[in-house]
Structure formats: C-alpha cells, structure tokens
Image (tube, rainbow, N blue to C red):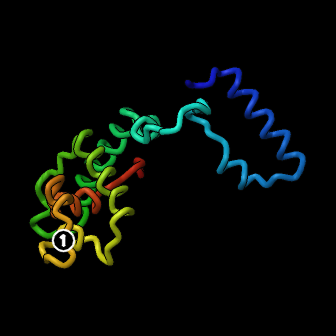
Amino acid sequence: MVKTKSKIQKAHSKSEHRAENGVSQKHLRLTQVDLVSIHIDQKMMKIDHWIIFFLIFDHSLIQKIVEETNKSHSYTVQHENLPERYQEAIGATGPEMYTFFAIYILMAHTRKSRIKEYWSTDPLISTPMFADIMTRDRFHLLFRFLHFNDNE
C-alpha cells in the first residue's frame, strides 16, 4: 500500500528533525524516498521485485531515457566521425529500453569479465539467455548512446 501524502510529509519532517540531531545529510539522501514511499505489510513474506522496478522505472522515465538516447545518437552522428555501423538511426523504443535495463540488472547475477562474454558461444562460458533476449550489437549500440538528460 502506498503512503498518503500527509504521511510522506510527516516522514520528511521527522528526517529533517533527525538531521538537527546529528544525522549526516548524506545518510538522509540514501534513506529518503521522494518519488514513492512503500509500506510493506509485515505478513507479506515475498516482495514482488517487478512492482518495485516499475515504480522506479515508470513509463514517463523510460520515455525520457528513450528520447534522450535517440537525441544523443543524432547529435553524435552529426558532430563526430563515427563508423558506418553507427550512422543508421538508432530508433530506441520503450519496451526495448525496459529489456536493456533488465539485461543490465541480470548481468549482476551472472558475472563475466567483459560485456561481450555474456553473448559468447564458447561452451565453457556461454549464457545463451542473453542472446535470446537481445543481440550483442544492439545492446552495445544502446549502451553506447544511453543518455538520461538533455545536454543543451
């Protein structure tokens, strides 16, 4: 259940009060949640991690990242001498960006020494799941131009 605005405001005022009592500002930044405050029922043993993921990476944030990534690609193509494989429009989409972040998070659970090893076909280190979700070249392209903010 999501806390009401008044509860969030109360939480902020308590945090500010704690700051006056010697808690560092750095600690407050790590513990305060400005976008959403979730109250987890103590009886609930299993937390659906997807709910938390979609609360953080909501549709408007993903759309902003897609827009800025596509702009970053266009700007870079116009102002830098890129190899031919980067010249074509990137055309990133919202669902594709969700997939990109899911792969990136999944990489933390399957550690490799290099990003390209996640797509390796070597039987000793292969993890075919990554290639089944997105091609290595597409992942690299999105990663190369990934952008969160307008630089202008």
Indicate left or right for 35 with 119 as reference. Answer: right
Residue on which disc 1 sits: 126
Instruction: Give the image quarter of residue 26.
Output: bottom right
**From what the image shows, is residue 142 above or below residue 96?**
below
- Between 52 and 65, the residue placed more toward the observer is 52
Residue at 84% from the left image edge and 43% from the top image edge: 18
Residue at 25% from the left image edge and 56% from the top image edge: 142
The N terminus - image quarter: top right
Looking at numbered disc 1 in the image, what kind of residue is underneath it?
Ser
**Residue 138: x and y, percent?**
17, 58
**Residue 50: x and y, percent?**
39, 39
Tag 1's secondary structure?
Answer: loop
Instruction: Give the image quarter of residue 81.
Output: bottom left
Residue at 16% from the left image edge and 72% from the top image edge: 120
Whether residue 77 is visible, yes or no, is: no
**From what the image shows, is residue 98 above or below residue 38?**
below
Indicate left or right for 108 with 47 as reference. Answer: left
**From what the image shows, is residue 152 above or below residue 17?**
below
**Residue 59: x and y, percent?**
36, 33
- Between 98 and 44, the residue placed more toward the observer is 44
Circle 1 crowding by C-alpha within 10 Å: few under 14, some 14–19, many from 20: some
